[in-house]
Amino acid sequence: MSTGRVHGISRRERVGLFLHRGLDRWLSPLGVWVFRRSKGGIAGPFKVDALLLTTRGRRSGRERTVVLQFFPDGDAMLLAAANDGGASHPGWYFNLVATPDARVEVKGRTIPVRAEELAPDEAAAAWPRIVERDHNYERYARAAGGRSIPILRLVPTDGGG
């Protein structure tokens, strides 16, 4: 008898993640607009730390802005490139690898940052803190089917505005 599980997640979880990724793609511009208008306050009821990340497109050279959950790390911020459990890393990850200088908007402030990917041992140490803060990341890791989920640290490069 088949359980309908692939990569340790149920068919229902797979469909949910597929829909979530699709909605993220289609609603991203609206999310950025709402985030800016509320100065990040829209994330409050969801009890998550969220930011706007603006990167330079690795192929287009154009600015790309997305809403992402982050995990505080002292003055820095950690991002998990989980892509909602997708088979590949998210576009913003590839943009940061190509051009690590970016900017974030957090709580109404714009902060220039430089991205650095955590070494495997650092990422392994950070992962339990990420999963403790948001249990969905454990499901994303299962859904990714063995794809390693990179963790990046965004380090402020000056005081910001």
Image (cartoon, grey):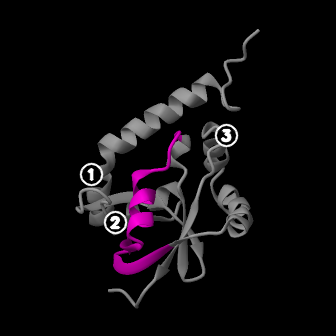
Residue located beneath label 2 in the image: 55
Q: Which residues are magenta?
A: 86-115
Q: How many marks?
A: 3
Which circle marks residue 142 in the picture? Answer: 3
Taking depth in this image into account, of 154 and 131 the one nearest to the observer is 154
Return the x and y of residue 91 as percentages of the image width and height: 40, 52
Upstream in sequence: badge 2 or badge 1: 1
Return the x and y of residue 138 as percentages of the image width and height: 67, 47
Q: Residue at x 55, y 50 (%)?
A: 82
Q: Amino acid at mark 1?
A: Pro
Upstream in sequence: badge 3 or badge 2: 2
Q: Please tell me in which quadrant of the rendered image residue 146 appears.
A: top right
Q: Within 10 angstroms of label 3, few (less than 14), some, or many (20 or more) residues?
A: some
Q: Are marks 2 and 1 in contact (CB under 8 Å)?
A: no
Taking depth in this image into account, of 89 and 5 the one nearest to the observer is 89
Q: Residue at x 67, y 18 (%)?
A: 4
Per the model, the C-alpha gap separating discs 3 and 2 is: 28 Å
For the question of whether residue 31 can be seen, the reply is: yes
Q: Amino acid at mark 3?
A: Arg
Per the model, the C-alpha gap separating discs 1 and 3 is: 28 Å
Residue most extreme to the right: 1
Which is closer to the viewer, label 2 or label 1?
Answer: 2
Upstream in sequence: badge 1 or badge 3: 1
Q: Is residue 125 above or below residue 84?
A: below
Quarter of the image for the C terminus: give it. Answer: bottom left
Q: Secondary structure at mark 2?
A: strand
Which is closer to the viewer, label 1 or label 3?
Answer: 3
Residue located beneath label 1 in the image: 29
Q: Is residue 77 magenta?
A: no
- From the viewer's perspective, tell me whether residue 44 is left or right of residue 82: left
